[in-house]
Amino acid sequence: MATLTVNRPPQGGFSFENCRRNALIEGEANKVGCSLPSARKTGTTICGIVFKGGVVLGADTRATEGMVVADKNCSKIHYISPNIYCCGAGTAADTEMTTQLISSNLELHALSTGRLPRVATANRMLKQMLFRYQGYIGAALVLGGIDCNGPHLYSIYPHGSTDKLPYVTMGSGSLAAMAVFEDRYKPDMEEEEAKQLVRDAIAAGIFNDLGSGSNIDLCVISKSKVDYLRPHDEANKKGVRTGDYKYKRGTTGVLTKVVAPLDLEVVEETIQTMDTS
Amino acid sequence: HCRMGQEERTSGGGLSTTILAIEFDGGVVLGSDSRVSAGASVVNRVMNKLSQLHDKIYCALSGSAADAQTIAEVVNYQLDVHSMEIGEDPQVRSAATLVRNISYKYKEELSAHLIVAGWDRRKGGQVYATLNGLLTRQPFAVGGSGSSYVYGFVDAEYRKGMSKEECQKFVVSTLSLAMNRDGSSGGVAYLVTIDEHCTEEKVILGNDLPTFYDQPPKYP
């Protein structure tokens, strides 16, 4: 994969280096009888809205791998810069890596210009990279932020086209969320009203789309502050079981009891920390 | 993959479209609808497909949204450089040539058609079609999926020597008819009028568009 830096201009065209290797690996795997793991998609409902004084971004928190929920509480609102955040739908790895790459390049760019980065800059960087990969990077993004020219909201598609709009939705639940927006959006809303509208739009996606679920995350970006509300609304709390399958001690009568202790000694002890970040 | 009409490709975002441009004595009028679709879903119902390449040169986008937007942005950049190099405003033919060069060189990979129109000092108002990498100047040009429905109308209604107002009315009527019949065109109509003195951008909302025969038959 071509690496982007501010100093070196990106080479044109898609790099097919790894495609032959991937095909070989898939062939080997199929010979043994197993298949390659499918890419984890985020199913998803993501949306954004411009209100008076900033933008509100919203996302659900379900990540699916085929028909199974792989992560019940994944974070889909990614940091790009202190004043710009980006929601990602599509292939989870692609959205994660793309946003991290552009975030890094944007920080270098901001240091080079000496100014706060603009949302239009992030938009250009993202769309030029996605176009270069001709849609093979499956990242559909909702980019929002506030800069010297005011609040801005963009939707960016995997093939590299972008739309600049006052409200956008993306992902499998986008139709449900857009229905809510089209009904209740008004220009220049107050912050609380905007947050409620985004929450309702994501909820529409969560409850009416199989690919979206769990909780609702919000990110409110305004001139003075950024509120990263995770979770903003735990719409799907795990229920408490009302019954129990355990039988009480003494339900089954015990006839004989034999206890055989196993004397084991500790030979080697290693500690491996789990990455729970 | 966003589409703006024309050939079938895998579903995604697209500028399914009606675009047209017409020349009058002293300038040009460009018009477009505003619908961007991804498969059966409309992802943007207010997209302005008339993209500015230079002060007095605009282009109308159709086909794949990503391809068309990218071509327009690249040519915008190249025209900026070119106009600084020659020290004056670029010719419309230069802009059309830049678009044509990209469309021709990458004709297998790209799926977009741009109509370039504008005004310059030497030849006044000009309209160029750049479909598939050709470059041809025409008195008027139509494009996009909705254009198929209005070829008859434009061929019958076009008159040589129309005034600016007549051209604007012609464009708005054509767009209205196409948007009514083409499922991939709709929304609002964007109009850009370019002449020697000014460049005027206008939006005509749905209910302000002219209406034509649209009544269901009144059978008892």
Image (cartoon, coloured by chain):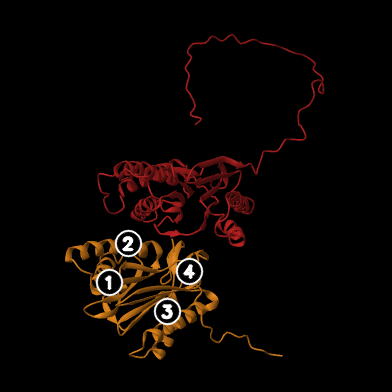
Chain colours: A red, B orange
Q: Is residue B70 above or below residue A133?
A: below
Identify the element where label 4 is drawn: loop
Q: Nearer the viewer, mark 2 or mark 1?
A: 2
Q: Are marks 3 and 2 on the same chain?
A: yes
Residue kind at label 1, given as amino acid type:
Gly
**Mark 2 or mark 3, which is nearer the start of the sequence?**
2
Badge 2 crowding class, 10 Å Cα cut-off, few under 14, some 14 to 19, many 20 or more, is some
What is the chain identity of the residue bearing mark 2?
Answer: B
Q: Would you name the residue on which mark 2 appears? A: B73
Q: Determine which of the numbered discs, if any, sits on residue B133 in the image.
A: 1
Identify the element where label 1 is drawn: helix
Write the residue at 44% across / 56% down: A157
Q: Nearer the viewer, mark 3 or mark 2?
A: 2
Q: Would you name the residue on which mark 3 appears? A: B147
Write the residue at 40% across / 57% down: A159
Q: Residue A170: x and y, percent?
A: 51, 55
Q: Disc 4, disc 3: CB below 8 Å?
A: no
Is residue A218 rendered to the left or right of residue B80?
right
Q: Would you name the residue on which mark 4 appears? A: B35
Using the image as rendered, state which of residue A166 and residue A13 is in the foreground: A166
**Mark 3 or mark 4, which is nearer the start of the sequence?**
4
Q: Residue A193: x and y, percent?
A: 61, 52
Q: Disc 4, disc 1: CB below 8 Å?
A: no
For the N terminus of chain B, the image quarter is: bottom left
**Mark 1 or mark 2, which is nearer the start of the sequence?**
2
Residue kind at label 3, given as amino acid type:
Ser
Q: Nearer the viewer, mark 4 or mark 1?
A: 4
Badge 3 crowding class, 10 Å Cα cut-off, few under 14, some 14 to 19, many 20 or more, is many
Instruction: Tell me the distance, in whole angstroms, between the alpha carbons under discs 4 and 1.
Output: 25 Å
